[in-house]
């Protein structure tokens, strides 16, 4: 990369640590999406019950 010395490059350890943080964030997002899907199902079921009335 232009203008960067070899001392500015991330080490393998830095890359692995960053990938670990990305993995944790993806897992958190997956949990959030599952909660949203659960709420969506509950709302859909409630909507169906309302339409029956």
Image (cartoon, grey):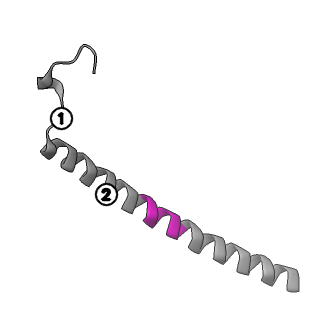
Per the picture, the main secondary structure of the magenta-coloured stretch is helix
Q: Nearer the viewer, residue 2 or 45?
A: 2
Give the residue furthest to the top: 3
Residue 53 shows in this picture: no
Residue found 37% across the figure and 62% down from its top: 27
Marks 1/2: CA–CA distance: 20 Å
Q: Which mark is residue 39?
A: none
Q: Which quarter shows the N terminus?
A: top left
Residue found 65% across the figure and 77% down from its top: 42
Return the residue at label 2.
Answer: 24
Return the residue at label 1.
Answer: 10
Q: Secondary structure at mark 1?
A: loop
Write down the quadrant of residue 23 in the picture.
bottom left
Write down the quadrant of residue 4 in the picture.
top left
Instruction: Specify few, some or many for label 2: CA neighbours under 10 Å numbering under 14, 14-19, or 20 or more.
Output: few
Residues under numbered marks 1 and 2 in contact, where contact means CB atoms less than 8 Å apart: no
Residue found 47% across the figure and 63% down from its top: 32
Classify 20 as above or below 45: above
Q: Nearer the viewer, residue 5 or 16?
A: 5
Frontmost of labels 1 and 2 is 1
Q: Is residue 34 magenta?
A: yes
Classify 49 as above or below 32: below
Give the x, y percent position of residue 18: 25, 46
Residue 27 shows in this picture: yes
Give the x, y percent position of residue 53: 88, 85
Give the residues in magenta: 29-35
Q: Nearer the viewer, residue 34 or 2?
A: 2
Q: Secondary structure at mark 2?
A: helix
Instruction: Say whether disc 1 or disc 2 marks the residue closer to the N-terminus.
Output: 1
Q: Does 46 sit left or right of 30 as displayed?
A: right
């Amino acid at each position: 990369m232009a203008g960067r010395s070899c001392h500015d490059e991330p080490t393998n350890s830095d890359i692995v640590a960053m990938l670990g943080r990305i993995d944790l964030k993806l897992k958190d997002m997956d949990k959030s999406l599952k909660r949203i899907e659960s709420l969506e199902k509950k709302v859909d079921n409630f909507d169906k019950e309302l339409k029956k009335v």
